[in-house]
Amino acid sequence: MHELSLCQSAVEVIQRQAEQHQVARVTGVWLEIGALSCVEESAVRFSFDRVCRGTVAQGCELHIAIKPAQAWCWDCSQAVEVVSQDARCPVCQGARLRIGNGDMLVVKSIEVE
């Protein structure tokens, strides 16, 4: 379950930011997950709750946004967004897509007390 290691990395980022800014408690975290990351949202929620125990983020509210991947369609020369590796161009239905970044997990924002 790679969600656990992803969440551990995210909590390390949160902890470092909390220490840098002398924050005693994190009340909310916003994560952005790439649509092509092969990450299960329910597994992220479960793992995040576990790795937050005993940290400044324990009990915080987790917000997750799934971000589509950016792609370039060679058929219609358009930049498009896709949510799967086998997606077709939403503009022309072409299948010749060059898919860019869509497999990341990013801590977008942290709410603190």
Image: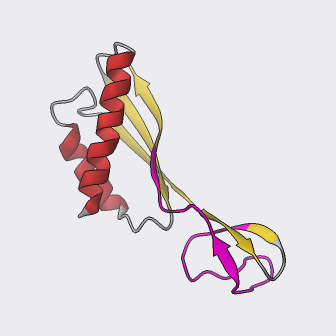
Q: Which residues are magenta?
A: 80-106
Camera-side residue of 49 and 14: 14
Camera-side residue of 29 and 8: 8
Residue 99 percent across, percent down from the top left: 62, 71
Residue 40 percent across, percent down from the top left: 35, 64
Please tell me in which quadrant of the rendered image residue 31 appears: top left
Residue at figure coordinates x 37%, y 60% from the top left: 41
Residue at figure coordinates x 17%, y 36% from the top left: 53
Taken as a whole, is the magenta stretch helix, strand or loop?
A: loop
Residue 76 percent across, percent down from the top left: 84, 78
Residue at figure coordinates x 73%, y 70% from the top left: 72
| Residue 107 seen in this snapshot | yes
Please tell me in which quadrant of the rendered image residue 71 appears: bottom right
Quadrant of the rendering where the N terminus is positioned: bottom left
Please tell me in which quadrant of the rendered image residue 107 appears: top left
* Extreme residue toward the right, this view: 76
* Extreme residue toward the left, this view: 54
Question: In this image, 86 relative to 18: left or right?
Answer: right
Question: In this image, 81 relative to 28: left or right?
Answer: right
Count the marks: 0
Would residue 11 be counted in the magenta stretch?
A: no
| Residue 113 seen in this snapshot | no
Residue at figure coordinates x 29%, y 36% from the top left: 12
Camera-side residue of 92 and 111: 92
Figure check: 71 above or below 10? below
Quadrant of the rendering where the C terminus is positioned: top left
Figure check: 61 above or below 67? above
Figure check: 37 above or below 84? above
Residue 97 percent across, percent down from the top left: 68, 78
Question: In this image, 36 relative to 48: left or right?
Answer: right
Camera-side residue of 55 and 70: 70
